[in-house]
Image: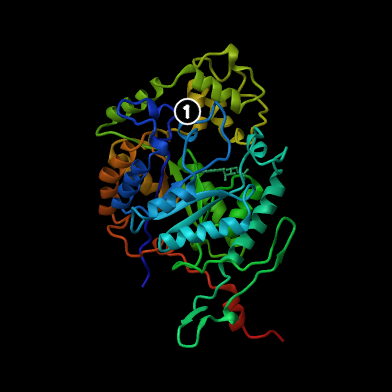
Amino acid sequence: MTRTREMKLSAYLVGTGMHASSWRLAGANPGASIDIDYYRALARTAERGKFDMVFLADSLAINEESHPNILNRFEPITLISALAGSTDRIGLVATASTSYSEPFNLARQLMSADRISKGRVGWNIVTTRDLSGNTARNFGSREHYGLEQRYRRAAEFVQVVRGLWDSWEDDAFVFDKASGRFFDPEKLHRIRHQGEFFSVEGPLNIARSPQGHPVLVQAGNSGPGQQFAAEVAEVIFAIKYNFEDAREYYQAFKRLVAGTGRNPDDVHIIQGISPVIGSTEEEALRKRRQFEELLTDETILGFLADYFKEVDFSRFTPETTAREAGLDTLQAKNPDYPKHQAVIARENPTLREVYSLIIGSFSGDHLVGTPEKIADTLERWFRDGAADGFMLMAPGLPEGLNDFVDEVVPILQKRGLFRHEYTGSTLREHFGLPVPPNRFAAAKERPVAR
Ligand SMILES: Cc1cc2nc3c(=O)[nH]c(=O)nc-3n(C[C@H](O)[C@H](O)[C@H](O)COP(=O)(O)O)c2cc1C
């Protein structure tokens, strides 16, 4: 029997929302990003909507230009451990960096959270972008790793973490009170890893969880980042602003996965969306305007000055056009810029609009409107080869999540695109992902090569 393909949904939880002015909306709680009761309520709402997972992003440094919701926030693994106690079924994904952690510590923290949640954890593997050098300075190093090096370190890091997770075979603990045998030493394994970046003996002091290993999530953008994701990730997180780009990315990425010898169906591509939902198109447009009007000139120009270090924005206002500021022809140092530049050169937006485009607080017009319109867009992307699911990065929280759960999810369910109830209990089960075999147990079963 073939299972009907179902859309995956994840909720990106970040204080009062993705939009930089969301904290200024009437009714918003600007202290939300460190309010555990608030996060509990968000996670429960996402669970009521039968979402596959909630997602916690992270960074390890801030500056004055940082998004208000990241200036003051929880460490993600600590937070998902707390959310595990307030929810029963939804997956809990925490971001952690391979450039600024040790594999032993992280393997242990993630497996503890995975056991606390009974197999609902995912790890968003990041290598940390550090254009300003602020992160490196928090960790005693003067310079951040270069691109190639940080992904080499990431690959070795993940290899060590997975090896540590397999330290104990699933039936290693015999707990035989009569004989006094607590565990079977044949089923305890040391990875004895010696590599370029790490030297780790093992074993880990915690056994595998009901889902074997936490689900591996990744969002690499660059060539090495995508190759790394194709080799290890089970859920890929991307942000594309229109259907054509999303489809092209999706198709190319699935080919990349197939090229590594993995089954492309075991890798789910989730597209980030920031919809604005209204009962009418006009209401949605009005809501979007409200966010924009609350942006201060300092927020816009400060962000752009940080993003384009080579341009002097003190001479401009938010109404200056991209062409007047020279952004259409700029050879920008920021490696993210080329993906926006074509749109900016073509449409000559104001700096206010450039800000919104780059920061991605909203998706395009295809995701501004009524619940039916949003559902139509998601259905098209899902059915026509552009996405396996979506990461809801609501411009304003909790409203954007509440509206999506109450108004968009029922439409997706009615159309047979999304689950009505959870059938599994682990995050792997929600995604239909296999439990990774314990490498040491599997090696014993393999016939000896002649
Ligand atoms: C949707 C999305 C979410 C991301 N979330 C984080 C995050 O929470 N923390 C982080 O350090 N990097 C995050 N990143 C950055 C990526 O992991 C990656 O470093 C970045 O896209 C640059 O790609 P590259 O490392 O391949 O150059 C995210 C990227 C994307 C596309």
Q: Is mark 1 within 8 Å of ligand 1?
A: no
Side of 204 relative to 408 (left or right): right
Q: Looking at the picture, how far across and down is residue 323, in whole percent?
A: 58, 18
Q: Could you tell me the amino acid type at mark 1? A: Ser
Q: Looking at the picture, how far across and down is residue 399, in whole percent?
A: 31, 36
Q: Would residue 119 be seen by someone viewing this image from the given angle? A: yes
Side of 338 relative to 175 (left or right): right
Could you say which quadrant of the image residue 194 lies in? bottom right
Side of 302 relative to 56 (left or right): right
- Label 1 Cα neighbours within 10 Å, binned few <14 / some 14-19 / many ≥20: some
Q: What residue is drawn where x is 45% and y is 50%?
A: 387
Q: Nearer the viewer, residue 423 or 96?
A: 96
Residue underneath mark 1: 356
Numbered-mark total: 1
Q: Looking at the picture, how far across and down is residue 91, in whole percent?
A: 40, 56
- Quadrant hosting ligand 1: top right
Q: Is residue 19 above or below residue 301?
A: below
Mark 1 lies on a secondary structure that is helix
Q: Is residue 191 above or below residue 329?
A: below
Q: Nearer the viewer, residue 295 or 203?
A: 203
Q: What residue is drawn where x is 61% and y is 66%?
A: 163
Quadrant location, the N terminus:
bottom left
